[in-house]
């Protein structure tokens, strides 16, 4: 039950002290209720000799109790109000920082919807549950302890009886907690299954519509899977409610019976003359307040049962590995890139690169060619340090990439990939993303060099036009040119090109190639090449097959060799001669 308090403390960081102070003020606030019972006891004890003095002392004790309550409640609110929002705000910021430093492999094992759900719905639920569970637990325990001590102070016999009922109530709470925990885990698994089926159905809706009516069996099968997942959620929730109601009613019965038995036993002891009337009446009132404290513990138990499943899911999704950050800040101006016996696999046991070794001179234009799946994109990803090799070394200027500070390394690398992402912001800010301190004039110049100034100017608000989510306002070729303008503004010394023109129309291709030539002037350029002109003009061609370097050299040198490269060129030349009849 107290695991969530431990987890909260571990997440609180510098806010731990405030949580501790909040617990203290909660306890002191609830102690004020004992002061009220002191007033009640004093009034009952002097019921036969009521006078102004009795009234005055009773009133003074009550007023002091009320003032003590409000002071501690005020301090509690000052210390605790919003603290869980601060804790989880800091947690989200910490997760955001770790996401920025995470290797790309993390994003391949955790899909975007799982990360977003963890950072929004699940974290918000944990945030709210933590605040409520904290209040219920500390309040319930402090009230129950104070009342129990008060009863023991007046009659050890009634105190033992009250303790017995508390132990019985705790047994009910224990079973309630275990049942709730099991049910919540089943419910979460069923909900995840339903979410998966719903997302799968939504993503495949276009495909489903393309099927003729005679193929409704496929659609029906998909709908049946969604319906089954929905029924699993319903059954899990129903089972939880039924068992929860059973244990909850049993718990409530124990508390009510216990309160009545405590009152009757207090009356019995009074009739036997073992305790005075004042104590009997005060203990009777305490019995009902004891019920209130234990009911709060019941609520805390339910919340505490829900929280581990959410926390476990958060821990699973947000267990973000971090790439080690080196200390070398300065990148050499003339820096060769060298692979030395590099091995790499995305999945254990399935090597993508094997004993790969080559050197790329600074300022050279290098083309990487090879069959699909041979490891070309992986080489580019490793140079950008999206991943680290399993073994071997990648050197830049004679030093291991791991020795460089990641931010400094990425400051010298620009990437132009086939799939371009634009942030939902203005065109100007998307280009300025390449260098935050760039002036408007520098942004404009970069756009002109990337051949995108004209279509940007034609937009309703020019450079201040919102691009839409992911850049939906633009075609693939236009987004590509904006990304090149961003890279031009960055002015990095190493340019990585991965199929930058493979999916654009011929009109856009000419514009993009002009922008790429502008971007690559005087830089070290490594491109995954498909165009014959790119391959022919390269200073060095690396031919990759099944993760190994099988050929390396210039175009003319490789063309006279019998191998993959010559077959690649022959296939491209044959494709160039194709004509429609």
Image (tube, rainbow, N blue to C red):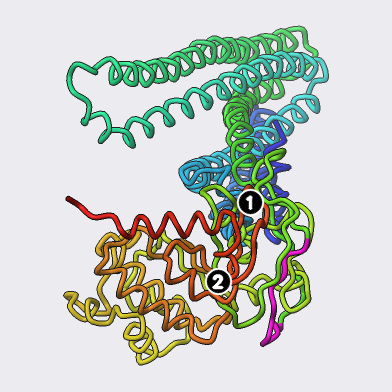
Q: Secondary structure at mark 1?
A: helix
Q: Is residue 335 magenta?
A: yes
Pointer 2: residues within 10 angstroms few (<14), some, or many (20+)?
A: few
For marks 2 and 1, the one nearer the N-term is 1
Dot 2: what SS? Answer: helix
The circle drawn on residue 402 is none
Left or right: residue 279 versus residue 36 is right
Instruction: Give coordinates of residue 507: x percent, y percent.
Output: 24, 69
Which residue has dot 2 on it?
Answer: 556
- Where is residue 284 shown, x and y percent of the image? 64, 20
Q: In the rendered image of this protein, does residue 431 appear above or below residue 168?
A: below
Report x, y in % for residue 38.
Answer: 69, 36
- Give the left or right position of residue 502, taking residue 396 as reference: left
Q: Is residue 524 left or right of residue 508?
A: right
Q: Which residue is mark 1?
A: 68
Give the residue drawn at x 70%, y 19%: 170
Predominant secondary structure, magenta span:
loop
């Amino acid at each position: 039950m107290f695991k969530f308090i431990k987890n909260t403390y571990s997440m609180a960081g510098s806010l731990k002290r405030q949580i501790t102070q909040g617990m203290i003020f909660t306890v002191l606030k609830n102690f004020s209720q004992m002061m009220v019972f002191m007033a009640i006891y004093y009034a009952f004890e002097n019921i036969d000799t009521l006078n102004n003095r009795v009234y005055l002392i009773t009133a003074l004790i009550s007023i002091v109790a009320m003032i003590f309550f409000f002071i501690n409640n005020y301090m509690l609110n000052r210390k605790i109000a919003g603290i869980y929002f601060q804790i989880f705000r800091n947690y989200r910021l910490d997760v955001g920082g770790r996401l920025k430093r995470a290797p790309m492999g993390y994003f391949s094992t955790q899909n975007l919807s799982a990360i977003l759900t963890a950072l929004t719905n699940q974290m918000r639920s944990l945030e709210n549950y933590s605040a409520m569970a904290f209040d219920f637990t500390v309040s319930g325990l402090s009230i129950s302890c104070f009342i129990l001590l008060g009863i023991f102070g007046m009659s050890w016999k009634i105190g033992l009886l009250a303790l017995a009922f508390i132990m019985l109530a705790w047994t009910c709470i224990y079973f309630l907690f275990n049942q709730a925990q099991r049910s919540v885990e089943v419910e979460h698994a069923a909900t995840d299954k339903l979410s998966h089926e719903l997302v799968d159905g939504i993503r495949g809706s276009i495909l489903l519509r393309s099927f003729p009516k005679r193929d409704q069996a496929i659609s029906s099968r998909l709908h049946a899977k969604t319906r089954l997942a929905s029924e699993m959620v319903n059954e899990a929730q129903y089972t939880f409610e039924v068992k929860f109601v059973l244990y909850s009613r049993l718990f409530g019965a124990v508390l009510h019976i216990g309160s009545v038995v405590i009152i009757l036993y207090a009356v019995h002891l009074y009739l036997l003359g073992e305790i005075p009337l004042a104590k009997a009446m005060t203990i009777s009132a305490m019995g009902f307040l004891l019920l209130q404290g234990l009911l709060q513990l019941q609520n805390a138990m339910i919340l505490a049962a829900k929280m581990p499943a959410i926390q476990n899911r958060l821990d699973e999704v947000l267990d973000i590995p971090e790439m080690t950050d080196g200390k070398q800040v300065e990148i050499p101006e003339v820096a060769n890139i060298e692979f030395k016996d590099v091995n790499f696999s995305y999945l254990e046991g399935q090597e993508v690169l094997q004993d790969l070794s080559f050197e790329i001179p600074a300022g050279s234009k290098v083309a990487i060619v090879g069959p699909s799946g041979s490891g070309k994109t992986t080489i580019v990803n490793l140079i950008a340090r999206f991943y680290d090799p399993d073994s071997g070394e990648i050197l830049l200027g004679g030093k291991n990439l791991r020795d460089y500070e990641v931010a400094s390394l990425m400051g010298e690398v620009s990437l132009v990939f086939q799939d371009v992402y634009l942030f939902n912001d203005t065109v100007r800010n998307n280009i300025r993303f390449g260098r935050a301190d760039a002036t408007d004039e520098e942004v404009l110049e970069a756009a002109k060099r990337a051949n995108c100034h004209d279509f940007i100017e034609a937009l309703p608000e020019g450079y201040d036009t919102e691009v839409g989510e992911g850049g939906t306002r633009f075609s693939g070729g236009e987004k590509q040119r904006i990304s090149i303008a961003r890279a031009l503004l960055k002015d990095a010394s190493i340019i990585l090109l991965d199929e930058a023109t493979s999916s654009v129309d011929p009109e856009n291709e000419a514009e993009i190639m002009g922008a790429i030539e502008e971007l690559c002037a005087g830089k070290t350029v490594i491109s995954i090449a498909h165009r014959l002109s790119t391959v022919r003009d390269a200073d060095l061609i690396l031919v990759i097959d099944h993760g190994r370097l099988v050929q390396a050299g210039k175009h003319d040198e490789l063309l006279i060799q019998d191998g993959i490269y010559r077959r690649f060129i022959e296939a491209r030349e044959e494709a160039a001669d194709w004509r429609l009849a």
